[in-house]
Amino acid sequence: MPQFPSLAGLLLALTCLASTPAWAAREVRGVKFADSSPLGGQVLQLNGVGVRVKVVLDIYAAGLYLPRKEAAVASILDMPGPKSMHIVLLRDLTGEDFADAMVKGFRKNNSDSDNAKYLPRIEAIRDTMLTFGNVKKGTSIHIDFVPGAGTRALIGGVQKGNDIPGEDFYAALLKIWLGNHPVDTSLKEDLLGGAR
């Protein structure tokens, strides 16, 4: 006579499945991005993932995490609360490469007056990036906005530099990827959920 699992056993199995971390979310170039990520006392949702390509080279995979999914750039930039860019390198880079690209992208996507206004904070995040040194393929970099603290850079889960204040600064930083002159147009579309 076949053995059927007890109701208690079935409920236990379902509970275990429900508590399994959601790593099935999205995978790009072999990099997995979870459906959600905790930050600042909230659980952020994966908005979109893509790859930064320069000429024909894959530079990094990136995922944008927000309090709720959103496809409109203006709504993302105005959205209050924690936010996070998760970046995983697909090739070796230096902190200087990363810092220079970030400053260039920031300047291209913000007005002259905003560039002047944010200059001390741009220099602060550039100095933080320079401390990264030589960064190996597969390294994870998070650029977070934590309410009450500011913009925070982590490499391999370890914070580098000090928090940089201002939610407005983080919105200006996000324009590197989401602005009118993004670092990569296809990546912008994917971060906005175009690959969903």
Image (cartoon, rainbow, N blue to C red):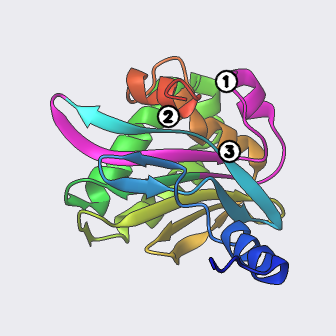
Figure disc tally? 3
Residue at numbered disc 1: 73
Would you say residue 18 sits in the magenta stretch?
no
Q: Position of residue 1 (x, y in %)?
A: 63, 79
Query: Image quarter for residue 82?
Result: bottom right
Residue 111, by quadrant, is: top right
Label 2 neighbourhood size at 10 Å, few (<14), some (14-19), many (20+)? many
Q: Earlier in the sequence, mark 1 or mark 2?
A: 1
**Percent from the top left, x then y, of residue 171?**
68, 39
Which residue does the image show at 70% across and 21% down from the upper left? 72
Disc 1 to disc 3, C-alpha distance? 15 Å
Image point (58%, 41%), residue name: 173
Q: Nearer the viewer, residue 22 or 93?
A: 22
65 or 123: nearer the eye?
Answer: 65
Residue furthest to the front in view is 1
Label ID, residue 176: 2
| SS type, badge 1 | helix
Q: Residue furthest left?
A: 56
Question: Sequence-wise, which precedes: disc 1 or disc 3?
Answer: 1
Q: Is residue 74 magenta?
A: yes
Mark 3 neighbour class, 10 Å CA radius: few under 14, some 14 to 19, many 20 or more = some
- What span is colored magenta in the figure? 55-84
The answer to whether the residues at label 1 and label 2 have Cβ atoms under 8 Å apart is no
